[in-house]
Image (cartoon, rainbow, N blue to C red):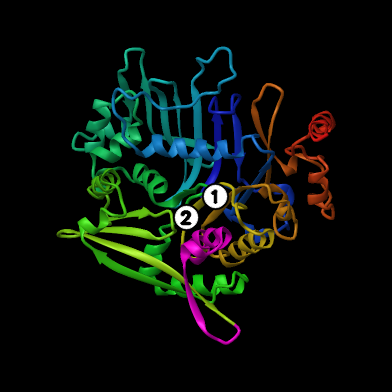
Amino acid sequence: MLVEFSVSNFRSFLEEQTFSLVASKRLTGSHEDHALPIPDSTERVLRVGVLYGANGAGKSNLYKALRFAEGVAIRTRNKSAGTGRTKFKFDAGGTTPSLFDIQIVAGGKLYRYGFKIDDESILEEWLVRVIGEREQPVFERATDATGNVKIDAADFKAKRDSKFGLLAAIGGPHNQSFLATARATLEAAELPEDVRNVVDWFVQVLRLTGPSETIEPVGHLLTSDAKFLDFAGEFLKLSSTGVDQLLVDKTEMTEEELGKFVPKSILSRVLDDLKSDKEGIGIVQMPDGNELIVEQTDANHFYRVGIQALHEDASGTMTPLALREESDGTRRLLQLLPALHTANSSKAVYFIDEIDRSMHPMLIWRFLEFFLRTCASGDGQIIVTTHESNLLDLELLRRDEIWFVEKNDALQTRLYPLTDFGVRKDLEIRKHYLQGRFGAVPFLGSLERLLDGKMAECQ
């Protein structure tokens, strides 16, 4: 689970800002089932976080910051490519390193992983296990002015037969995290447990979903999991989308036939990715909502997955429509349903940017309610950015699950929770938010002068 995430000097963030899902002890008795214990701690972590803010305030930049941190943590880089960071553009100095620091629960333990980075190098990096008030270092990294990387992992360097210790003695590329170097160089069994837990969290647990992306490859999931096929069809039906049932078809294709749908450059990239994919499955999302699946066993197998929605008319006749013929809202809802299907069994952390894109307000409310009610025994989380004010409902959310994002006069984004305000339990949060009491809304200037000019052009 994600416990806290701090960032500074990245996109619209200059001064360090922290998004925290640590449950407030002042809210004891409020939706107690929304929080889970944090290992080796008296604190608890929340299952849901909802971020509000005006257009351009920086909500999506928090999502992008976490995506950037994920990339640094697990992906290798060309030695001459720099680090790829996007620093705050309105700072006159511009030489301050960017900071990323994340606390997570992984493998039943609490960890803090982070790094300081400039345009050329990762200057510092750390991984510690947090036990109560104590931090137990796993490794620490520093890069000097000449680009030499020094790793302090004393517990492992002392073990001469430890491949991780040998790798720590060597270091790694100056613009690449040591975590990514260890992941790319060693087998999973050769990684220390603490390192493996954190790598697995970034690779398998964290699910970052942009406005036009799907949480999971839905077509592949529909063909491989009959329970999900039934669940998705029933959910769409009960959500008044007009869909009564889903049909899915998986057809094998030759590589030549596949070339009609996928450019060679994309197919080559998918095949290259398969070499490092333990499951041997590559998926290409098509613009029409369908998918192309590549399975690598003793040879490459290519499949086209087609999704159709059945609609029942007044006479009882079922008519199939291709997924591309469905509304954007129906397709968006289908893309998000894997998060609900696995709510009880999955430990996934879903961060969904702009969850309200093409979705009706009532559906978004029901989506989060369904997750909270079905994941009472699970460790999953959902974090969303949204403009949908109907979620500002204390019957649905706790006050510490609601966060606001706002820019100041220096164009810097700041984050703050609803708990920063003295709010009565019976206060209508939505009404006061729209009135600007909590900030994080667009304060529109007068449009009268602009309107007068346009009206004059019509005369």
Q: Position of residue 354 (x, y in %)?
A: 59, 48
In this rendering, position of residue 175 left or right of residue 347: left
> Which one is nearer the viewer's eye here, 388 or 101?
388
The residue most toward the left is: 298
Q: Residue at x 24, y 26 (%)?
A: 170
Number of disc labels = 2
Q: Is residue 272 above or below residue 333?
A: above
| Snapshot quadrant of residue 155 | top left
Tags 2 and 1 in contact by the CB under 8 Å rule? yes
Label placed on residue 215: 2
Q: Is residue 199 covered in magenta?
A: no
Distance between the alpha carbons at the discs numbered 2 and 1: 8 Å
Secondary structure found at label 2? loop
Q: Which residue in the rendered view is the most extreme toward the front?
A: 459
Residue 458: x %, y % from top left: 80, 35
Residue 308: image x %, image y %?
44, 70
**In the image, what residue occupies the spot 29% across and 47% down?**
263
Please state if 188 lies on the left or on the right of 399 as rendered: left
Q: Quadrant of residue 13?
A: top right
Can residue 287 be seen here? The reply is yes
Residue 181 percent coordinates (x, y): 29, 34
- Range covered by the magenta-colored residues: 314-342
Read off the residue under disc 1.
Answer: 352
Horizontal side of residue 363 vs 279, given as left or right: right
Dot 2 or dot 1, earlier in sequence: 2
In this rendering, is residue 82 above or below 57? above
The amino acid type of the residue labelled 1 equals Ile
Q: Residues within 10 Å of mark 2 (few under 14, many from 20)?
A: some
Residue 336 colored magenta?
Answer: yes
The residue positioned 34% from the left and 37% from the top of the image is: 75
